[in-house]
Image (spheres, helix red, strand yellow):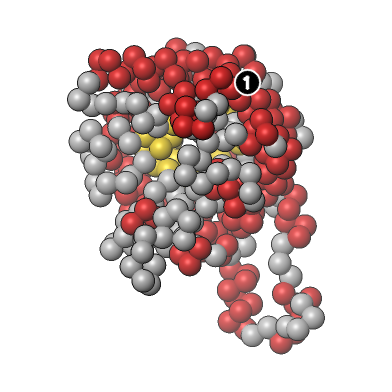
C-alpha cells in the first residue's frame, strides 16, 4: 500500500523543483558500532532498532525529506554471508516500519530500497535475471505491504540489473528512482556509457534517474551535468562526501600517504567538510538536479548544511553554528572566516 502524505515524490519535484534526500546509513551505523564492516549487512534493523530510528530522526531534523528503509543489502545473497537468511522477511518488514514511524513525525516520504545483488551475471543473463527478479520481488512485496511512497533502486553496476529492478517497481505501480554506481571511468559493467544508460532507464519509465555512491562531488558533477543535458525528466545526484579527483575518480581508489588503499576504513582524511557539501548542493541545484542527496559517508550535519544551502530552515537549524558566541573566538572571528561561515547558508 502507499502511505498517506501531503505530497508524493513526483508532486514535490513538480512543485518545489528539488527534493533533499540523505543516505549513508550503513557507513554511519558502522561508525556508531551497530554494523560490521565487511559484510555491511543491516542486522541493526533487528538487533538495535532504536539506533536506526534515531538516525532516521536525525536526518529528518536536519532537513531530509525521505526516510529510506534500511534494506540495502537486506537480500538473500548478502544475508547468507552472516547466516541470517532466515531473518530476510522480518528484517525487510521491520526496516520499512521503522522508516514509517519516524516519517510520521514530520512530513517525510518513505522509500523502499533495493540495490546491486552481486547475483547478476551478464554472461548468463537468462538465469541470473530470474534470481535477481525473485530477490527484488520479495523485498518490494514486503515493503509495499508495510507502506512506502516510492522506490529507490540504487548502486547499480549493470544497466541490465537496473532494468530488472525498474520493471518490478513499475509492476507495483510505484514511482521509481533508479541510480547507477560509477566505479568504472565511463561505462557500466555491462558496457553502457553512463549518460546513455540513464537515458535508457528514463525511456523505460524511470521517473528519476542519475548517480549515487562511488564518486565525490568533484568527479560526479561533470558526469551528472552531461546526464542533465541529455535526460529530459528528473535527475538525481547522491555523491559520497569524499575528495575524489581526476587521479582517483572513486572513493574506492583513494590512497593514503603510505600508498595503502583508504577504502573503506581509512577514508577519514578525505572527508569533505560541511561547507563543501553545502557548496555541492548549491552547484547541483544550479545544474538543474532535482533530487539532491548524499551517500556512503553521509551524516546528519552534512544534510543540515545542504538544506540550509538550498534556502531551507530545518528543525536542526536551531543549533546551527554561531561562532560570534564562541568563548575563545567571539568578536575576534576574522573577516575571512565570517565569509566562509556565512556564505554557505545563502
Is residue 265 visible to us here?
A: yes
Q: Nearer the viewer, residue 106 or 80?
A: 80
Q: Position of residue 76 (x, y in %)?
A: 47, 23
Looking at this rendering, what residue extends furthest in the front direction? 83
Q: Position of residue 95 (x, y in %)?
A: 63, 28
Residue 124 left/right relative to 255: left
Q: Tell me where residue 135 sits by quadrant.
A: top left
Residue at 73%, 53% in the rendered image: 316
Q: Position of residue 338 (x, y in %)?
A: 64, 77
Q: Nearer the viewer, residue 194 or 165?
A: 165
For label 1, count other residues whose C-alpha is less than 10 Å away and answer few (under 14), some (14-19) or many (20+).
few
Q: Nearer the viewer, residue 113 or 276?
A: 113
Residue at 52%, 23% in the rendered image: 85
Against 30, residue 117 (above or below) is above
Q: How many marks?
A: 1
Against 215, residue 254 (above or below) is below
Residue at 27%, 46% in the rendered image: 184
Q: Which residue is mark 1?
A: 90
Q: Tell me where residue 23 sits by quadrant.
A: top right
Q: The C terminus is located in which quarter?
A: bottom right
Against 5, residue 133 (above or below) is above
Against 331, residue 94 (above or below) is above
Q: Position of residue 14 (x, y in %)?
A: 53, 33
Residue 95 left/right relative to 253: right
Q: The N terminus is located in which quarter?
A: top right
Is residue 108 visible to us here?
A: no
Residue at 36%, 38% in the rendered image: 180
Disc 1 element = helix
Amino acid at each position: 500500500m502507499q502511505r498517506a502524505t501531503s505530497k508524493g515524490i513526483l508532486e514535490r519535484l513538480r512543485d518545489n523543483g528539488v527534493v533533499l534526500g540523505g543516505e549513508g546509513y550503513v557507513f554511519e551505523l558502522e561508525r556508531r558500532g551497530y554494523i560490521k564492516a565487511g559484510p555491511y549487512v543491516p542486522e541493526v534493523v533487528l538487533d538495535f532498532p532504536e539506533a536506526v530510528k534515531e538516525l532516521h530522526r536525525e536526518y529528518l531534523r536536519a532537513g531530509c525529506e525521505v526516510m529510506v528503509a534500511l534494506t540495502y543489502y537486506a537480500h538473500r545473497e548478502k544475508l547468507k554471508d552472516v547466516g541470517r537468511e532466515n531473518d530476510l522477511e522480518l528484517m525487510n518488514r521491520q526496516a520499512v516500519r521503522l522508516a514509517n514511524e519516524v516519517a510520521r513525525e514530520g512530513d517525510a516520504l518513505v522509500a523502499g530500497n533495493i540495490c546491486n545483488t552481486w547475483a547478476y551475471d551478464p554472461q548468463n543473463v537468462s538465469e541470473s535475471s530470474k534470481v535477481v527478479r525473485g530477490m527484488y520481488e520479495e523485498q518490494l512485496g514486503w515493503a509495499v505491504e508495510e507502506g512506502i511512497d516510492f522506490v529507490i533502486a540504487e548502486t547499480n553496476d549493470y544497466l541490465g540489473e537496473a532494468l530488472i529492478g525498474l520493471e518490478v517497481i513499475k509492476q507495483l505501480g510505484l514511482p521509481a528512482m533508479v541510480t547507477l554506481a560509477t566505479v568504472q571511468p565511463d561505462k557500466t559493467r555491462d558496457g553502457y556509457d553512463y549518460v546513455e544508460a540513464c537515458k535508457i532507464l528514463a525511456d523505460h519509465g524511470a521517473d528519476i534517474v542519475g548517480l549515487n555512491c562511488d564518486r565525490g562531488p568533484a568527479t560526479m558533477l561533470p558526469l551528472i551535468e552531461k546526464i542533465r543535458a541529455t535526460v529530459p525528466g528528473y535527475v538525481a545526484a547522491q555523491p559520497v562526501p569524499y575528495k575524489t579527483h581526476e587521479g582517483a575518480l572513486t572513493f574506492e581508489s583513494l590512497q593514503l600517504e603510505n600508498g595503502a588503499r583508504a577504502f573503506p576504513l581509512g577514508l577519514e582524511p578525505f572527508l569533505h567538510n560541511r561547507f563543501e557539501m553545502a557548496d555541492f548542493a548549491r552547484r547541483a541545484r544550479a545544474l538543474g538536479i532535482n533530487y539532491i542527496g548524499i551517500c556512503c559517508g553521509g551524516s546528519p550535519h552534512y544534510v543540515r548544511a545542504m538544506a540550509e544551502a538550498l534556502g531551507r530552515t530545518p528543525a536542526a537549524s536551531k543549533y546551527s553554528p554561531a561562532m560570534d558566541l564562541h568563548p575563545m573566538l567571539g568578536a575576534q572571528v576574522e573577516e575571512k572566516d565570517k565569509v566562509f561561515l556565512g556564505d554557505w547558508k545563502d
